[in-house]
Image (cartoon, rainbow, N blue to C red):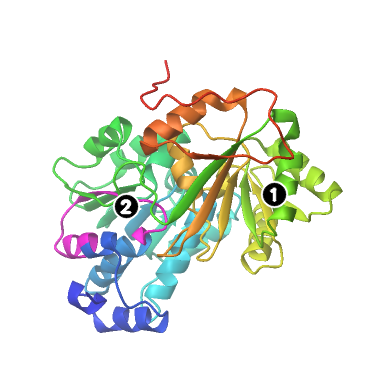
Amino acid sequence: MSFAKLGLSDPILKALSDSGYQTPTEIQKKAIPLILKGEDIIASAQTGTGKTASFVLPILQKLNNGETVRGRSIRALILVPTRELAIQVEKSILNYGKHLKLSSLAIYGGTDIEENKQRLAKGIDMLVATPGRLLDMAYQRALFFNDLEFLVLDEADRMLDMGFIDDLNKIIDRLPANRQSMLFSATLNDKIRYLADTVYDDAVEIKITPKGKTAKIEQWMIAVDKDTKSALLSHLIKESQWDQALIFVEKKHSAAKLVEQLGKRGILADSIHAGRSQAQRERVWNEFKTGKLQFLVATGVAARGLDMQNLSRVINYDLPYPAEEYIHRIGRTGRAGNSGEAISLVSKDDFKNLCMIESLLNQLLERREVAEFPVRKPVPVSILNYHRK
């Protein structure tokens, strides 16, 4: 199936062609026609499946057929959990809408509030925002929601994990009832369904990837003692001659420490975490994305919103909690139909997290050994039906 068969207009099809996109993904095939018809949707799709285009493309088309935006008004609101994702989504809007005369803006913490106000004063067709910055603008009467036609909650599960539920409720209470709403999430759990019930009463549900499935990503783990993790990682990088890897840790001080440990073994790495400025994070990510930097250590802040089509592998230096975060992390590789590799370094202390992850996947991760790193504290075989008490 081609994009033309989904009912998209010629200017949008030309933008897709300019970018080399020819065939829609499964989420795009299902979501775009429904959104064009005016349906509210709840969609579950793994990261890397093209979900951003699945809502940006039809909204662009419908806005282009509508009225001109008024000052301090917005016509479409896309709520996202992180500044990185806000930047990525607006880039997609600019790319797909480059042959249309529609305005867009991304607002998030760490940017100039006065500059945001000046842009909003002219009115914006598509606004991408993090919840906190959007409420700041609303409280300061820098924008109004009377003309809002579309609401998108992107990475809804991540927003709930980050504690945005109160902010989301405050925002939703301000929005006109007569709007089209879309919720996108990598997982559809009870919390997401409860949130969806506050957004709309009757929505079409789209479920693309069964819970926990991660096609085209080779997943395996190595049991390791906690005090030899950094040495094992350095060994794997050198012996396997890895070209590049995104390495996830749980805490920002762990990121700086691991970068230092790798550096002492002759491996150049840098880090992204909440303690670094937006400018620093963008610089480091661009260096990694262009291949100038081979190894990037990141906290969960980088698990969403950083898009790289050809990342060959992801390393879970620390296992994440909750288990769903594992899906988002490894979804940074194996994107857009490419294959990828996800490796987890697991110590005995990680056993409960490992059980939850493998229960989510409904499979045991392949266990491999490195002869040079015998384990003093073995990791037990996982319990697939494990539930955290």
Residue that badge 1 annotates: 236
Picture coordinates of residue 277, whole percent (x, y) = 68, 50
Q: Secondary structure at mark 2?
A: strand
Q: CA distance from mark 1 to mark 2?
A: 41 Å
Q: What residue is drawn where x is 57% and y is 51%?
A: 314
Q: Position of residue 265 (x, y in %)?
A: 84, 49
Instruction: Report the amino acid beneath label 1.
Output: Leu
The residue nearer to you, when weighing 254 against 378, is: 378
Place of residue 270 in the rendered image (x, y in percent of width and height, measured from the top left): 73, 53
Residue 42 horizontal side relative to residue 133, left or right? left
Tag 2: amino acid: Val
The secondary element bearing badge 1 is classed as helix
Q: Which residue is mark 2?
A: 152
Residue shown at 50% from the left, 23% from the top: 352
14 and 234: which one is in front? Answer: 234
Badge 2 local density, few (<14 within 10 Å), some, or many (20+)?
A: many
User: For the residues carrying marks 1 and 2, which lies nearer the camera in this image?
Assistant: 1
User: Do callouts 1 and 2 mark residues in contact (Cβ within 8 Å)?
Assistant: no
Instruction: Let me know if residue 356 appears in the view.
Output: yes
Q: Which mark is residue 20?
A: none
Above or below: residue 226 compared with residue 307: above
Give the position of the C terminus as an image quadrant.
top left
Bin the neighbour count of mark 1 within 10 Å (Cα to Cα): few under 14, some 14-19, many 20 and up: few
Left or right placement of residue 385 versus residue 284 in this view: left
Q: Which residues are magenta?
A: 30-51
Magenta-span inclusion, residue 99: no
The quadrant holding residue 157 is: top left
